[in-house]
Image (tube, rainbow, N blue to C red):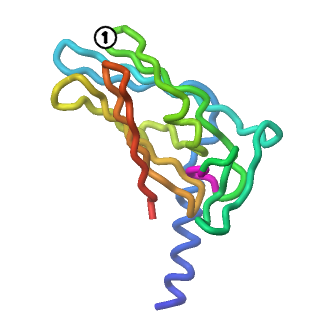
Amino acid sequence: MKSLIVVAIPLFSFMVSHAQSQRIGDYQFNRSKGSHTSRIVIRNEPFDPSQHRTAYDEGSGKNLVDGRAAYGAEGVPRTQIRSIKFYVDGREIKVQSRLYSDCYNPNLERRYVNISWGRDARSVLVTMLGADGAGAYYVVWILRKNGKHSRYFKDAF
C-alpha cells in the first residue's frame, strides 16, 4: 500500500502541473443571466524573479513572494496573473490587484475556470484552479456590481 501511495502522489502531481497552461495572454470568459451579461478578462504574464523577493517560510511551510504567501508556487513561480478585468452589462468594474497578485501559475483554460451568476444577479462567482504540483489551489472570486469584491482559497490537496 505504501508503494502505491509513493507512486500515485508524484504521478498526480505531474498530471496537475503538466495540465498547467504555459500560454501567455488574455483569457476571456462570458456568462449571461436574463438580460444581464458578464465578461471576465484575465491576463497572465511570465513571472520575473528579478522584480520580486522570493523566500520560504519554515514556520508555515509556504513559499513567499514579496512577503506574501505565493499560492500555486512550489518554488519560484513560472507565471502570474497580471490583471483581471470585470464587466457587467458592458460597464467595467475595477478589480483590485490585492485579489489576484498572489495567485501564481494559474490554469486559464476553460476547463479550469468557471463563471456563474449569483442568485440575485448582483454578483458573479469565478472559480479557478491554479497549480504547481503540491502547491495546487482553488480560488473563488466573488465579483460584485458594487465593486466590493472578495475571494476565498482552498488547497487542492
> Which residue sits at x=71%, y=39%?
47
Is residue 35 rendered magenta in the image? Answer: no
User: Where is 145 relative to 136, above or below?
Assistant: above
Residue 16 lies left or right of residue 122; in this view the side is: right
Q: Which residues lie in the magenta part?
A: 69-73
Is 1 placed left or right of 72 in the picture?
left
Quick one: 19 or 157, which is closer to the camera?
Answer: 157
Residue 114: x and y, percent?
36, 38
Q: Does 72 appear in magenta? A: yes
Decide: is 144 above or below 68.
Answer: above
- Mark 1 lies on residue: 89
Q: Secondary structure at mark 1?
A: loop
In this rendering, the count of numbered labels is: 1
Magenta residues, dominant SS class: loop
**Residue for point 48% across, 38% down:** 109
Q: Quadrant of residue 141?
A: top left
Question: Toward which corner of the image does residue 90 lie, by quadrant?
Answer: top left
Residue 64 place in picture, x, y as percent: 66, 52
Q: Is the residue marked by circle 1 packed among few (<14), some (14-19), or many (20+) residues within 10 Å?
A: few
User: Which residue sits at x=57%, y=48%?
Assistant: 20
